[in-house]
Image (tube, helix red, strand yellow):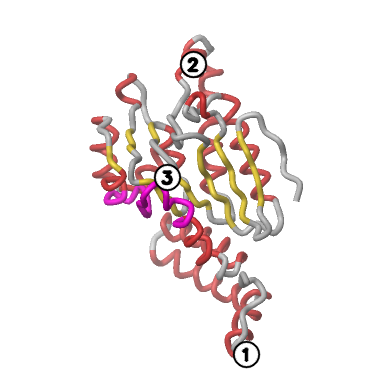
Amino acid sequence: MKTPAFETLLLDIDARGVARLTLNRPETHNALNATLITELRQAAAWLAGATGLRAVVLTGAGKTFCAGGDLGWMQQNMKKTRAERVADSAELATMFRALNELPMPLIGRINGPAYGGGVGMISVCDVSIAVDSGVYCLTEVRLGLLPANIAPYVVARMGEANARRSFLTARRMSATEARRLGLVSEVTPDDQLDAAVERELADLLQCAPGAVAATKKLIDYVDKHDLSTSMIYTADKLADAWETEEGSEGITAFFAKRPPAWRAA
């Protein structure tokens, strides 16, 4: 599968259909500038439409996952008109939403520290595996700014009470604390990060890709609706699943005591 080329990203896809998307601005600790933000949105759109993809692994080049917003980019925004600043903020919000709504699982390979928008990047991942040396901080209020575009995802990840303390004090969190707050899913020694990511992928590749995509939408729907509304939706979705090729294949394979067609060898 031919992948698009980017200035600030690396994108590779292996034979299993696992994409690796790498933030590639190590000289700035992978800080988010206008180019990286736009290219992340473009990459998410391409990945969402690609066929045969099973998962996306998101990571950073170098020793930092993502240092948040590039201060040079922010300084440039100060010189723009109100309309231009709103447009730049909307582009950032659209990028986070595009990553959050990828149909396939987004696995965060959190290879180092994350600040501000980098914590937002972690929060849009379905699963995040972090090195135990990492530190995390929502730094915006120290700069007189707000963690605005990332707030929906960070609050959903760690809950309102934890978000209040983390947002309002800009306190640093260790990887262990980030795990306790639900920001990251697993913490591992630096030299075991890739093995931990591969274990997560091994489980994922046992699952039907269409069912996984539908389940991501299911989780989002039931989280935003009341029980009565969700019951109507879920009744339809289970009936839909029974009518899919994957549903038929999964049940048939179970009774035939053979692996289903999507199962990784």
Q: Is residue 222 left or right of residue 87?
A: left
Residue linked to disc 2: 72
The amino acid on which the numbered mark 1 sits, given as a three-letter code, is Ala
Mark 2–mark 1 contact, CB under 8 Å? Answer: no
Q: Quadrant of the C terminus?
A: bottom right
- Disc 1 is placed on an element classified as helix
Residue 183 at what x, y percent from top left?
35, 47
Q: Magenta includes 63?
A: no
Residue located 68% across and 75% down the image: 245
The amino acid on which the numbered mark 2 sits, given as a three-letter code, is Gly
The amino acid on which the numbered mark 3 sits, given as a three-letter code, is Ser
Q: Which of marks 3 and 1 is in front?
A: 1
Task: Please rate how many residues cluster around mark 2, counting C-alpha atoms within 10 Å: few if below 14, some from 14 to 19, many from 20.
Answer: few
Give the mark nearest the N terminus, 2 or 1: 2
Q: In which quarter of the image is residue 160?
A: top left
- Residue 123: mark: 3
The front one of 50 and 107 is 107
Q: Give the range drawn in magenta.
A: 179-196
Give the mark nearest the N terminus, 3 or 2: 2
- Disc 3 is placed on an element classified as helix
Instruction: Give the tally of numbered discs.
Output: 3
Residue located 52% across and 51% down the image: 106
Direction front: furthest residue? 191
Direction top: furthest residue? 79
Residue linked to disc 1: 256
Task: Please rate how many residues cluster around mark 3, counting C-alpha atoms within 10 Å: few if below 14, some from 14 to 19, many from 20.
Answer: many
